[in-house]
Amino acid sequence: MITAALLSLILISVWVGFYELVKQHGRLLLRLDELAGQIANLTQGVQAENAGAEAEPQGVPVGTAFPSFSFPDLNGTMVALADFQGARVVLVHWNFQCGFCESIAADLASLEASFQERNVRLVLLAYGDPQSNREQAAEYGLKCPILLMKDDETPAPFVSQGTPVAYLLDEEGRTAAPLASGRDQVLELAQEAAQPESGSSEAATTRSSGRDVGASEASQPKPQRSRLPGARPLAESRIERGGLKAGTPAPVFRLPDLRGRMVSLEEYRGQRVLLVFSDPQCGPCDELAPHLTRLHQQHANNGLALILVGRGDREENRRKVEQHGYQFPVVLQEKWKLSKDYGIFATPVAFLIGADGVIAKDVAVGRDAILAAVRDEAPQGMGEIK
């Protein structure tokens, strides 16, 4: 009898203990769920804050007066930003030696008539000497003011920027749109400036960020973007920008090497050719260099020819050839003309051209892609390509 009572007490104690344990476990789970919810809310808040920060446009804030400047034009006449007050200004940080600038030069020239009709001035802040800028402006039909700067005279908003980048300024010299960076954004900004205005001229363009500027402007109607008669979207621009595609006949060329001997692509018909575009001031090109030297040593006699297309100063290219020990032809293009023919302005890039003179593979951009393109397309017996 006593034994049964003790056993009952023990069972009751075990059950009560188990009940308390389950109850504590339930509270713990509820607390963990609560903490998880708080963490999730905090994470979402941080992500939203970061997303908002990423959406903020770089450069001079919209509505801010652009810093004043005064530079000589191609005739030596000093021209100041204040001289353009009363007109909107597409102000472009420019360099004709930049392939990305050259790739949109003709497109900008085609907009100048529309600019004039709509009281918009296209102004290029450029580098170099008057004669070379004059010749290149004439080549592309640019008639806009070109103001020449020295390297240490670049206006502050452009100091840390490359070329091309641009601002749209209003009639009072204030920024009317976020910074346009790169050829596509600059051309888009110019195309929009060439369109008829609707609504207040004070309304900020929300081209890239969609951000309203100021509460008073938020209620103003936004201009509708109607395409100009004859204007084409960027994808239909006359200049190819993504590189010629596989199956396209490789544009032929005849260019001088560093000794003045003319090198023609036609000479290599019947051979596979790796055509590499490089620049002596390009860091990734230096990283690619030892691989090109090794590639030539391994495969010069088994069906793969290598031609490097350089640009810029002859002596600078000669020093690079000596530094890397190139034993294959290095030819010089004038500005970016051959790059334009092949539809891409970056370096290093390469095209693998078949023995029939047709591009065998889409453009390879960068060291790894270039080496992979040769490795993937190497015929049997060529050996390992490193």
Image (cartoon, grey):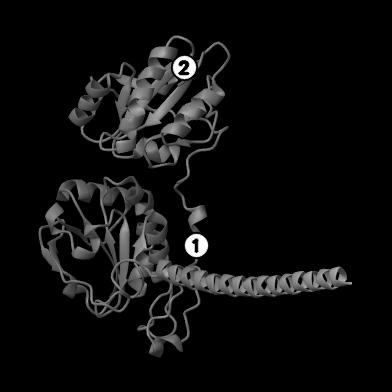
148 in relation to 21, above or below: above
Query: Pointer 1: what residue?
Result: 230
Q: Quadrant of the N terminus?
A: bottom right
| Secondary structure under the numbered disc 2 in the rendered image | strand
The C terminus - image quarter: top left
Q: Mark 2 belongs to which amino acid? A: Leu
Amino acid type at mark 1: Gly
Q: CA separation, marks 2 and 1?
A: 45 Å
**In this rendering, does residue 202 appear at all?**
yes
The reply to whether callout 2 and callout 1 are in contact (CB within 8 Å) is no
Q: Residue at x 42, y 66 (%)?
A: 54
Q: Is 1 positioned to the left or the right of 165 in the image?
A: right
> Of label 2 and label 1, which has the lower sequence position?
1
Work out whether 102 lies above or below 222: above
Residue at 43% from the left image edge and 28% from the top image edge: 252
Residue 118's x, y, as percent? 36, 75
Q: Is residue 264 visible?
A: no
SS label for mark 1: loop
The answer to which quarter of the image holds residue 195 is bottom left
Q: Is residue 135 above or below residue 2?
A: above
Q: Quadrant of residue 72?
A: bottom left
Residue extending farthest to the right is 1
